[in-house]
Each structure stands twice: as structure tokens, then as C-alpha cells.
Image (spheres, rainbow, N blue to C red):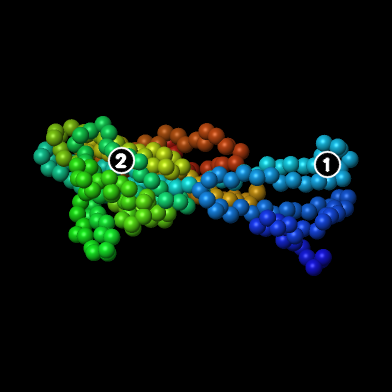
Amino acid sequence: DENADQLVGVENGVNTLPQLISIQPEESITLILEYRPTTDEEPTGRLVMDTNSASENLRQLVIPIQGARVAAEIVVSPNFVDFGRVSIGETKTLNVVVSNIGQVAASIRDMRINESANYTMAFPQWALPRNDGTPVEPRDITPADPEWAMAMNDPDADGEPGLAPNTSFDLAITFTAQFERGDNGELSIETNAVIPNVLVNLQANGSAPCIQVIPNELVFGAGQINMDNESLLTIESCGAEALTVNSVAITAGGDNFRIPQEAIEGRLPGRLA
């Protein structure tokens, strides 16, 4: 239909655009390019247009095209774990949830706890069914168990390597108190995700303030030009003492991002109990 507002152009290598596209003076047309990932590689291409432009160097326009690489994205909740007061010789276990919110499976390359030997970790009640489908009794898997490598390779126990998109698994962190003073640790999870190393701070027997920010990365996604696209950031006081937030600032991209004054008016500088 020559009066249609939109024509199918190039799809699956087949060009169905009219042989000639005539654009009258003071008029314009819009080409809509769509990107559909078929692999986890970063695709590239070129848009080539031959024209009758008066400028010789503009008679053939070559516009590079680059698509975003499809990737895994790991988030851990909570991103700060406070065990509170634990008496000498006693233990306390808290779980964190490791999720893949990306588009491809995430491969876990390493998980470890740094800074303190008083924290340990385990896959709670993990089991991978046998090849014949016979169920296996779930149990806690620690780094000392021979099944640890299997659990790292298939943390969601779905029979496929990696942590599948839009799935998660629990990781149990156990603290054993050896003394009354504060004890801090750090959980490190290394993957093939966009952020390859995710860190979670661990604290026990501490009375100092602590901060937990949810989420730990703001991703707005696609938005319309000159239209506000809102995203929420929660700042939580997770320690035994009040948290003081002295300032909040955007250090890059200030022309595109802002914090509305009404969102923090009367609260900063301030204290979160």
C-alpha cells in the first residue's frame, strides 16, 4: 500500500523497501531498526544508504551498528549481612539469595569468604537428581564436601550448567563467635556476569552504623526523550547505631539524571534510626 505509514524494510536478509525512496524538501522519513539477539555475542553491522546528495562524500552513507552483548547479571540480597550479637562459642546462620536477572546463564567461577575465618558458607539442602531421575536426599553442601564443585557448576540444581536466567539460589552464611569484639568478613562471588565480582559485607558483634542500599545498581532501561523515568533507591540503616547520611550527589551524567528536591527535602543531612 503506497499510502501506508510504515513499510517492512529489511528482514532476515530480504530487502522489501522500494527501489527508490523519494524525500521531498522539508520532509523526512524515519527508519526503525530492531535488534533481536540470537547469541550471547556482541553483534555488529552497517547500515548503507546510496543517495543523490550534492556532497560527493555523502552520496554513500555508512552508519555502523552495534548491539549490546547479552549477558548474565548477578544480584545478592541482602548486600549487607548483620548477625547482631553472638556469644562466644555460639553460631548463627543467615541466608542470602543469589539471583540472575540477566538474559543468559551465569557461570559461578569462585565463591569465597575473605577477612575472617569465623564465617563459613554452604548450599543449604542442595541435591542434584541422578541421571535415571532417582531423587537424592538434599543436604547442606560446604566447600569441604566433594559435591561443592558440582553445586558451584549447577547452583539451581536444574541439571544444566550455571544459574539460569530469572532463577536464584540460597547461600547459607554461618558465623561462629570466637570473641566478643566485632568481626567483619566479606563474601565474594565471581561469575561471567556484567559485574564479574559481587561483594557482600558481613558483620557480627558490631555496634557501628551500617548502610544497605537496595538495589545496588540502578538500571532505568529504555525511555522516551524528555520524559521522566523514575527508579527508587532505598537506603536502610542495618546496624546497631543510627546511620548518618551527610550528603547525596550524582557525580556523573548529571545532565540526564537528577534527584527531585521533594524526595529528600527535610531529611538530609540527617540520621536514620
| Quarter of the rendering containing residue 46 | top right
Q: As shown in the figure, which amino acid type bears the numbered disc 2?
A: Met
Which residue is most to the bottom?
1
In depth, the one of 266 and 234 nearer the eye is: 234
The percent coordinates of residue 207 (x first, y second) are 24, 36
The percent coordinates of residue 58 (x first, y second) are 82, 39
Q: Residue at x 81, y 52 (%)?
A: 28
Q: Which mark is residue 82?
A: none
In depth, the one of 200 and 124 nearer the eye is: 124
Q: Is residue 263 left or right of residue 48?
A: left
Q: Residue at x 37, y 36 (%)?
A: 244
- Does residue 164 show up? yes
Q: Is residue 65 left or right of residue 206?
A: right
The percent coordinates of residue 90 (x first, y second) are 12, 42
Disc nearest the viewer among 1 and 2: 1
In depth, the one of 22 and 186 nearer the eye is: 22
Which residue is most to the left?
89
- The answer for how far apart the CA atoms under marks 1 and 2 are is 56 Å
Helix, strand or loop under label 2: strand
Q: Earlier in the sequence, mark 1 or mark 2?
A: 1
Crowd band around label 1 with a 10 angstrom C-alpha radius: few (<14), some (14–19), many (20+): few
The percent coordinates of residue 34 (x first, y second) are 64, 54
Q: Residue at x 75, y 53 (%)?
A: 30
Q: Is residue 84 left or right of residue 259?
A: left
Residue annotated with mark 1: 59
Residue annotated with mark 2: 111
| Quadrant occupied by the N terminus | bottom right
Q: As shown in the figure, which amino acid type bears the numbered disc 1?
A: Arg
The number of callouts visible is 2
- Does residue 77 show up? no
Helix, strand or loop under label 1: loop
